[in-house]
Image (tube, rainbow, N blue to C red):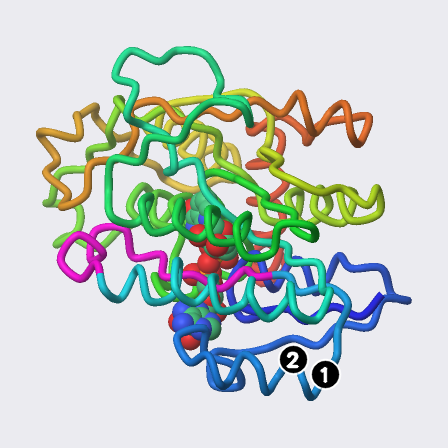
Amino acid sequence: MKILLFGSQGQLGQDLLRTFPKDWSVVPLTRTEADLTQADSISSVLERTNPNVVVNCAAYNLVDLAEKDPQAAFATNALGVKALAEQCHTRHILLVQISTDYVFGGEANRQTPYTEQDPPSPIGIYGMSKRMGEIYTQRYCPDHHLIVRTCGLYGLHGAGGKGKNFPKIIFEVATTQDPDRLAKPFQVVTDEMGTPTYCADLAWGIVALLLQKSRGIFHVTNSGSCSRWECAQEICRLAEQSGFPVRYPSKTTQAEYGLAARRPAYAVLSNEKFRQQVGTILPDWKDALARYFAALLAPHKEEK
Ligand SMILES: NC(=O)c1ccc[n+]([C@@H]2O[C@H](COP(=O)([O-])OP(=O)(O)OC[C@H]3O[C@@H](n4cnc5c(N)ncnc54)[C@H](OP(=O)(O)O)[C@@H]3O)[C@@H](O)[C@H]2O)c1
């Protein structure tokens, strides 16, 4: 198997590079080597490398900025994916497109996990642009695609465009000794339910799907669910357990917090289709967070 990996410098890309079986040939791409907004750069890299699988982890992920600059989000997440899908179809390449729980959210009273059959209903520009990427993948590469929807990613390699992920930010704010930061409120929203997902576990899930020759849409997250506030509480508990002085966050709501983009109040994804395909599901989100912090804090422990 020869894989071309778009977004290889991002947090999921980095964990996929560590997880792909050693006998697979992998070509990791940076944005400089192949920019999804430049159709020419996509066709030339495919021509040069001649893969049989393209895994696209590249995305415009700046959820709040996307509300002010929809063109930038659609250029990468929708039109870039369209160009990739067209090229993959012509060259009989399998396109693995990574997507998001933010394609859901329009059902105000939803309280049961979304399945792959549920109709998407994005409520923000980022979610809309990612949904267009899914539609273009299905339409322009109809016979050879695998769409993997996931949620709340964090990896040892912090998120590319954003620099940090939610667990890292919460850990830093919870354990800071900086008086200026301590003077500011520490609040986390309770009205955003999802499943934080460790990129190392998701990378394992993507490889498992590839080994099963899976096609179509799959939801792949760690198991269980929590609000952002519950996730933050767990991060604080893990930090405290590791000997850090910790302050716990207070509760707030999206409306009070006032970010530019509204997030889905409930975007938990059902992993049942994945379980049927692969025979198991990813570990519980608390188990994953504990392994993440053990790995993240390991160098600090050695320093002490
Ligand atoms: N992060 C989450 O919480 C989350 C949740 C659900 C789904 N997802 C999806 O999961 C996938 C991986 O996310 P991630 O958190 O690993 O992202 P990430 O860390 O932000 O990495 C994204 C990568 O894409 C590259 N990129 C951005 N625009 C590009 C373009 N026009 N052409 C080529 N490369 C480009 C970035 O390069 P630069 O560093 O140069 O910008 C970066 O290396 C994405 O599809 C995302 O939508 C993420």
Q: Residue 69 colored magenta? A: yes
Q: Residue at x 84, y 41 (%)?
A: 212
Which of the two residues, 277 or 153, is positioned nearer the viewer here?
Answer: 277
Percent of width and height locating residue 298: 62, 54
Q: Residue at x 26, y 22 (%)?
A: 191
* Secondary element type, mark 2: helix
CA–CA distance between discs 2 and 1? 5 Å
Q: Quadrant of residue 111?
A: top left
Residue type highlighted by circle 1: Thr
Q: Is residue 155 left or right of residue 93?
A: left
Percent of width and height locating residue 223: 60, 25
> As drawn, which residue projects farthest toward the right?
23
Q: Which residue is mark 2?
A: 46
Q: Is residue 214 left or right of residue 285?
A: right
Name the disc covering residue 49, or none: 1
Residue type highlighted by circle 2: Leu
Q: Is residue 285 left or right of residue 162?
A: right
Asked if the residues shown at circle 2 and circle 1 are in contact, with their CB atoms under 8 angstroms apart, the answer is yes
Which of the two residues, 301 or 84, is positioned nearer the viewer here?
Answer: 84
Percent of width and height locating residue 206: 70, 47
Rendered position, 29 above or below 116: below
Q: Residue at x 84, y 47 (%)?
A: 211
Name the disc covering residue 124, or none: none
Q: Residue at x 61, y 35 (%)?
A: 220
The magenta span reads: 56-70
Label 1 beta carbon less than 8 Å to ligand 1: no
Quadrant for the C terminus, please: bottom right
